[in-house]
Image: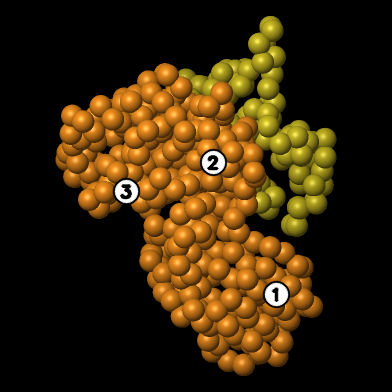
Amino acid sequence: MKSLVVIAPVAVWPSVKAMNSALGYAAGDGVELSSDGSAPATHLGLHTWATDGFIAIATGQVTPTIEGYTAQDIANLLAAITVSVEPSVGEQILKRKAHFDHVASSLGLQTIEVAL
Amino acid sequence: MLFKLGQLMARGKGSAVAGFDPSTLFASSEDGALFDPSDLTSLYQGRTGGSNSGIGDVVGLMLDKRLMGDQTAAEFIAAQSEHISSFTQNLSGWTSLSATEITSDGSDASRATSDASVIAGDYYLLEYEVTGGVSGLCQLRLGGTFVRTEGSSDVIRSDIVKAFDTTPFSVTNSGSWIGTMTNISIKHIPGNHALAPSDAARPILRQSGNVFSIEDDNVDDALNVTLPDLGSDATEIIMTTTGVTINTAQTIGAGSRDALTDNMVGYAVIDRALTAQETSDITAYAATKRGA
């Protein structure tokens, strides 16, 4: 499995969840993000461990057949979100939180820390 | 139950280094939870069971071992008695109704209901096989939880279902289903089990030598356990590959608690203080779990 990060605008997240649900995968509510790390969130993101098959779908290499969605619907959604798979920075392959933070940072976003 | 021989062998190696059985902390019916990632039969990739987690796989469900003694989760579940002993139908259409096999001829939109109610909030292992399906659909529910829809495909299922109410397991012939469900088995899995809140939030199982750990991505991963009120003198023991943290005199009210810590090799929470001997024992146990 590979480290996969997905970040999407808040308005698009319901579509991310719905399409993932149609694929039998629960995306969850997402981690809240904004430009300065304070509420309200402008984007939501997730980190997960994904199989090559799921990565092929998430990166648009394979277009799945999903009931209720056309190929154009899927392409439109992928165009509206950011998907990243284990990027290399120098000689280091980023995974987990380092991966998530790298992608968020590249979009000018910070995690909104929730006080416990 | 689906598990691989290699996982059972790995479990054997993992348990051989641990002399103290932490489930003995709960011998006087103490409440709480106990998790041991070295028992791979207690870890499931899916949040509704299915295949056990192997090394490098995600963990969607982690079973509480405090009631299992020194058994693996697979051994404990296998030893549980069958939860149901018969089915009845509300209309006609079911031509065979035994404890382990039901057959529908599709002549009526009838529901076959088992004889035993379940405990709301508890988990059950539901296993069955669909054979001889011809046409139509049927829907399975347990404890008010929709499990899945079956059709005419021959399949073997193994799901862990969390009951939301006490409604007995039932199969509703919702579309002239013609087929047989056989080898039906429902077993209660008592305990406060931990569940990932979504598929994306599932952590991953790692192994280094005899050490089995669960890796938290520190982004969104969680394994949430729903606990009863443990009072104001609870003890929480967090075991990782780098050490053990024992938090004493904790006030832990009823609700959800994340049992996951990065590189977790074990976790326990109990509704009382530990004795000095127990603290020594669990500290030594944690050391064996991290290979020290």
Q: Toward the viewer: B286 or A43? A: B286
Cβ atoms under marks 3 and 1 closer than 8 Å: no
Mark 3 to mark 1 CA distance (whole Å): 37 Å
Q: How many marks?
A: 3
Report whether residue B229 is seen.
no
Cβ atoms under marks 1 and 2 closer than 8 Å: no
Q: Quick check: do tags 3 and 2 share a chain?
A: yes
- The colour one sees for chain B in the rendered image is orange
Quadrant housing the N terminus of chain B: bottom right
Give residue B227's mark. 3
Q: Amino acid at mark 2?
A: Leu
Q: Amino acid at mark 1?
A: Leu
- The single residue placed furthest to the top in the displayed view is A90
Name the residue beneath numbered marker 2: B40
Report whether residue A96 is seen.
yes
Q: Quick check: do tags 1 and 2 share a chain?
A: yes
- The colour one sees for chain A in the rendered image is yellow
Q: Earlier in the sequence, mark 3 or mark 1?
A: 1
Task: State the residue at coordinates (54%, 49%).
Answer: B47
Q: Toward the viewer: A51 or B282? A: B282
Name the residue beneath numbered marker 1: B137
Between tags 3 and 1, which lies in front? 3
Mark 1 to mark 2 CA distance (whole Å): 35 Å
Q: Residues within 10 Å of mark 2 (few under 14, many from 20)?
A: many
